[in-house]
Image (tube, helix red, strand yellow):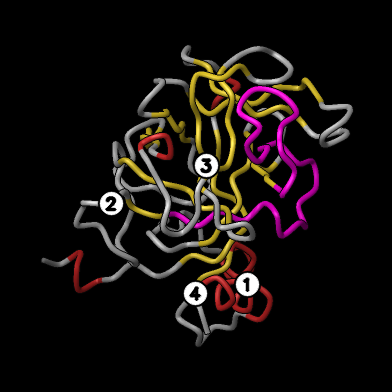
Amino acid sequence: MGFFSLALFLFLSVDSDSGYTSASAAAASGKEGVEITYGSAMKLMHEKTKVRLHSHDVPYGSGSGQQSVTGFPGVVDSNSYWIVKPVPGTTAKQGDAVMSGATIRLQHMKTRKWLHSHLHASPISGNLEVSCFGDDSNSDTGDHWKLIIEGSGKTWKQDQRVRLQHIDTSGYLHSHDKKYQRIAGGQQEVCGIREKRADNVWLAAEGVYLPVDESSSSK
């Protein structure tokens, strides 16, 4: 079974012996601050408006014409899962904790495209467009994001306030209450903004979190 199928299966049927930690299981057991590792499948929640970072096989009608990325108001939707991946050429591997300042990629679990940005204008606000682009074997620096943890944390944890800054454009992953009427009626625009604002803070929410690989962390 591939990881993507396994992750979804585990999210639906995780138990205490699985070795994986789901957000719901952690909450039920009183655990807090589950570490985010490479290979984890999760949803990102926009702190201010509570929408989930979302994509689906619907292209933008302007700009790049690539697959659209939005803020989805519901919690239960498989199109809101993202896989945390390292960038090519690094030593990071599945099961390693994600450190503050790391450059990462987010792969949309359902369409296998990468969270991407560039200089095209976003459809509603005219900021930097955020899209999904590429596939398992097609990725470039437009898919690279710097993880910035708010506060003193050194490793990314569930429910921790973070920002994602796009490497090529310096834009922060951003959302606001401006909603689409056509391509994704009622969903919020997601875009990039170069200024650090309250509207570009996100938290890791629901998901299936791979346990930290203790063998690599002890080296």
Asked if the stretch drawn in magenta spans residue 80, the answer is: yes
Question: Which badge, 2 or 1, comes first in the chain's sequence?
Answer: 1
| Residue in the picture at 33% in, 48% down | 155
Using the image, tell me which numbered label, if any, was put on residue 115. Answer: 3
Marks 4/3: CA distance? 19 Å
Secondary structure at badge 4 equals: helix
Question: Which badge, 3 or 2, comes first in the chain's sequence?
Answer: 2
Secondary structure at badge 3 equals: strand
**Type of residue at label 3?**
Leu
Question: What's drawn in magenta, residue-wise?
Answer: 56-84
Marks 1/4: CA distance? 9 Å
Marks 3/2: CA distance? 15 Å
Q: Dot 4 surroundings within 10 Å: few (below 14), some, or many (20 or more)?
A: few
**Type of residue at label 4?**
Phe
Image marks 2 and 1: residues in contact by CB distance under 8 Å: no
| Residue in the picture at 29% in, 61% down | 96
**Type of residue at label 1?**
Leu
In the image, 46: left or right of 59? left
Q: Nearer the viewer, mark 3 or mark 1?
A: 3
Asked if the stretch drawn in magenta spans residue 77, the answer is: yes
Q: Dot 2 surroundings within 10 Å: few (below 14), some, or many (20 or more)?
A: few
Residue 122 in picture, x, y percent from top left: 64, 20
Image marks 3 and 1: residues in contact by CB distance under 8 Å: no
Q: Which residue is mark 2?
A: 88
Residue 168 in picture, x, y percent from top left: 37, 25
Q: Dot 3 surroundings within 10 Å: few (below 14), some, or many (20 or more)?
A: many
In the image, 154: left or right of 193? left
Using the image, tell me which numbered label, if any, was put on residue 8. Answer: 1
Residue 181 in picture, x, y percent from top left: 89, 27
Marks 2/1: CA distance? 25 Å
Q: Dot 1 surroundings within 10 Å: few (below 14), some, or many (20 or more)?
A: some
Q: Nearer the viewer, residue 64 or 213?
A: 64
